[in-house]
Each structure stands twice: as C-alpha cells, then as structure tokens.
Amino acid sequence: MTQIADAAAPASESKPEPAAAPVAAEATTAPSESAKTEAKEPQNTLTERFTTAEWNALKEFRKILPEIFAEGLPDNADAKTTAITLWGVKIDPADPIDAKVSVVLMKFLRARNLSVNEARSMLVGTLRWRSEFDVEAAVKEEFPADVFDSLGHVYGKDKQGRPVVYNIYGATNVKAAFSDVKRFLRWRVALMEKSLALLDFETIDQTVQVHDYAGVSLSSRDANSKQAASEASGIFSDHYPELLYKKFFVNVPGYLTWIFWLFKPLISANTLAKMSVVGSGAPAIGKALLPIIEAKELPKQYGGEADGF
C-alpha cells in the first residue's frame, strides 16, 4: 500500500485532511449571488462561484499577506512588499486584488475549512518549503531519461480542459528511481509543477491523476520506496492544496485493493470523493475514465483512442 500512498493516496492519510469548505457546484456557469455583491472585485469564471463566506475569509486572508510573506520568507528583508510566483500566478502581498490570485489563495482557505489562521500557517509552511526545496531549480533540473521518462507523463486533458497526469508504478526501472529518494522527490515535484503550469486559474484550476499499478508486487516495496511515497504524500498534502479534481487507481493488484478498503474508514470524505479504484484492462479502465476524458485524449491502454506515451 505504500506505493499507493504517493501523492495523497489511501495509506498516506496519516494526517487526516480537514473537511473542505462547501464549494459552489461545478456545473454552475452563471455568477453566484455572492459574486454579484462583489462587483468591485476582479472576477473570472472561478471566482464567480465563490460563496459569501469564502469572499469574507479571502478578504481577511489578504489583509495579512505581508505578515505571511515575512514569516514564510525570513531571509528576504523586503518580503512584505516583494511579489512571488506560485503555480504560475504572480502574488503581490502589497496588492493582491487580482482574480487569479484570489483563486490561488482560496485553495489554502478551502483546505482549512475557511479558517484564516490555519490557512495562514499552511501558506507560511508552503513558502518556507518552496524556498528550502528550491522548487524553481527542480523544475529546470535534468533527470536521467532511462530512469524517469517512463514513470510519469502529463498527457491530454479531460472534458473540462483539466490536464491529466499519469504515474506508472510498474515501470521496469522503478527501483532505480527510488534508489535516490531525494532525486525522486525532486523529479516528482517537477512533474507536479509542470502539470500546474497548464492551469490558467481562470477556468481551470485542478488536474486529474491516473495512477497505474500494473506489474506492482509486494517485492517492489523496499525501504526507499516506502520513504519516497511517504515524503511525496506529505509534500502534496501540505503544499499543494485543492489542486486535485479526481484520482484514478488503475490496474491495482487484488492485495492493494483489499488494503485500500481496509484504510477507507481513515480517509476523509472529501479525499475519498475524489478517488476511484478501477479494475484492470482497457475495457474496465475505459468505463471509468471515458465519462470524463474524451476517447481521443485517452491512451489506448486505458480504453481510449490516443496513441499515448
């Protein structure tokens, strides 16, 4: 189960995720009543779905951004007035009135049930982690193609335009990938960042993930893979909030499916609603994925028509 734990999978829910704040229905296209009352706020398709409670929390959150930046970036004496870029969105702590910025900040608030204090702690931690990890350098880093090229792919999009990320855990070189945990984590974060670069935070602000376990066995679970999965899960849970729309676990061996159901009671309802454990083989996988991904965007091995990767 440890490998399923990568990127907030079942066994990795060691720190229960707080229940997410209610979010306006995705199907809503017209501005909400609360959006109409926020006429002076810069709006886009996503902010128009904010509730009144979310707007109120956001306004309070923005007021303390200078202090958050100062605490999260202690080595920068001018942090209170220096803009940063997070997931491709420029955030100026001194002037955060921007629709895209609102969408990004709302993710921290929703992840903490609109608690401004808890969202503050989460954003401070994220700023510190990004600086220490040097995320920008990881994105530019070159990783051995023979080790990592078959492990992860950003390919196609779902019917709403969300990027689809594929993680292949049964790749023949998976042990080589986990042999250096630090390197694996930098590669995994880089893959995440590259998928987020495809979001516009105007109409699309989440990704779809497909985790493929074909060929995974108990013998592949060594100490390094367990450590890598645990650390990756913690990173994504703590520093990439509310960026996942749906996660599919496909070609999952029977013993891992059993473990998933064993841990199901420990998984928050919000997380569980985003997860689907699917059977093996293209027909079964396609039945689950084709309702949200067009056949032309879905690789043939997953029941689609695309040549894939």
Image: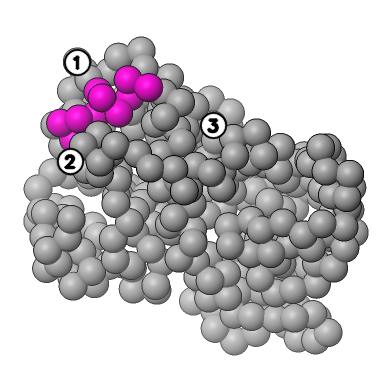
Residue placed under numbered mark 3 in the picture = 234
| Above/below status of 86 relative to 18 | below
Mark 2 Cα-neighbour bin, 10 Å: few <14, some 14–19, many ≥20: many
Q: Position of residue 227 (x, y in %)?
A: 43, 19
Identify the residue at image location x=17%, y=60%. 308
Q: Earlier in the sequence, mark 1 or mark 2?
A: 1
* Residue 160 x, y percent position in the rendering: 40, 74
Tag 3–tag 1 contact (CB < 8 Å): no
Separation of disc 3 and disc 1 at Cα? Answer: 24 Å
Question: Which amino acid type is shown beneath numbered disc 1?
Answer: Ser
Q: Which residues are magenta?
A: 171-180
Camera-side residue of 26 and 210: 210
Tell me the residue at 59%/80% (across/down). 45
Task: Point out which mark residue 251 bears.
Answer: 2
Please name whichever residue, 144 or 107, is drawn nearer the observer in this view of the structure.
144
Residue 269 lies, with reference to residue 147, above or below; the image says: below
For badge 3, the amino acid type reads: Gly
| 1 or 2: mark nearer the eye | 1
Q: Is residue 163 left or right of residue 66?
A: left
In the rendered image, the quadrant that contains the N terminus is top left
Q: CA distance from mark 3 to mark 2?
A: 24 Å
**Image location of residue 120, percent across then percent down:** 79, 45
Dot placed on the residue nearer the N-terminal end, 3 or 1: 1
Q: Which image quadrant: the C terminus?
A: bottom left
According to the picture, the residue beneath numbered tag 1 turns out to be 219
Query: x, y percentage for residue 21?
Result: 66, 54
Instruction: Determine whether the residue tagged by mark 2 lies in a helix, strand or loop.
Output: loop
Q: Report whether 191 appears left or right of 28.
A: left
Amino acid at the residue labelled 2: Asn
